[in-house]
Image: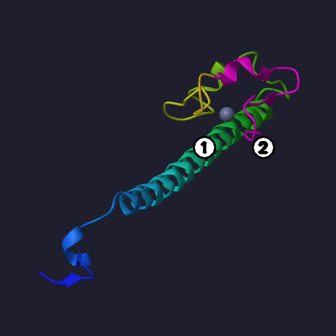
Amino acid sequence: MIKWHGRKARSDRGFTVVELMVTMLILGILVGIVVMTMSISRRKAKESACRANLRTLIDGLILYKSTHDGAYPALLEHLAPDYIKGSFDWTCPSGSINYRLNYDPITGDVWCTESGHQI
Ligand SMILES: [Zn+2]
């Protein structure tokens, strides 16, 4: 055992409480940054998915209008399955907002009320 001025050598002492607290603080900050980044990424992915859904609906509405003398369907459900293929998700990926409730059959507008989801 090496002694310096009556104290144990640093290699024999282990970590002090202050060193452990600083390490925990740095780890906490890093975890916070990672969680915040992942949250932002998830939100942006949902925004992109919502905009893609809206574009699909708008494309289906344009096709429907072109084959029905310029008239839009009374309900968005009338687009399936002829103008929208597959199993279409009628709700915004961010929550329970239903596109069918945000459709104007007069103008053909379809929208999402979540912020940042507009085309
Ligand atoms: Zn949305």
Residue 2 in percent (x, y) is at 16, 84
Residue 73's place in the image compared with 15, above or below, is above
In the foreground, 94 or 55: 94
> Which residue is the site of mark 2?
119
- Mark 1, Cα crowd under 10 Å, few <14 / some 14-19 / many 20+, is some
> What element does badge 1 sit on?
helix
Residue at left offset 70%, top offset 42%: 55
Quadrant where ligand 1 appears: top right
Which residue is more in the foreground, 6 or 21?
Answer: 6
Q: Name the residue under label 1.
A: 43
Picture layout, residue 119 above or below residue 73: below
Name the residue rendered at 65%, 23% in the picture.
97
> Depth check: 89 or 62 in front?
89
Quick one: label 2, few (<14), some, or many (20+) residues within 10 Å? few
Q: Earlier in the sequence, mark 1 or mark 2?
A: 1
- Side of 67 where 11 appears, left or right: left
Image position, residue 88 (x, y; %):
54, 31
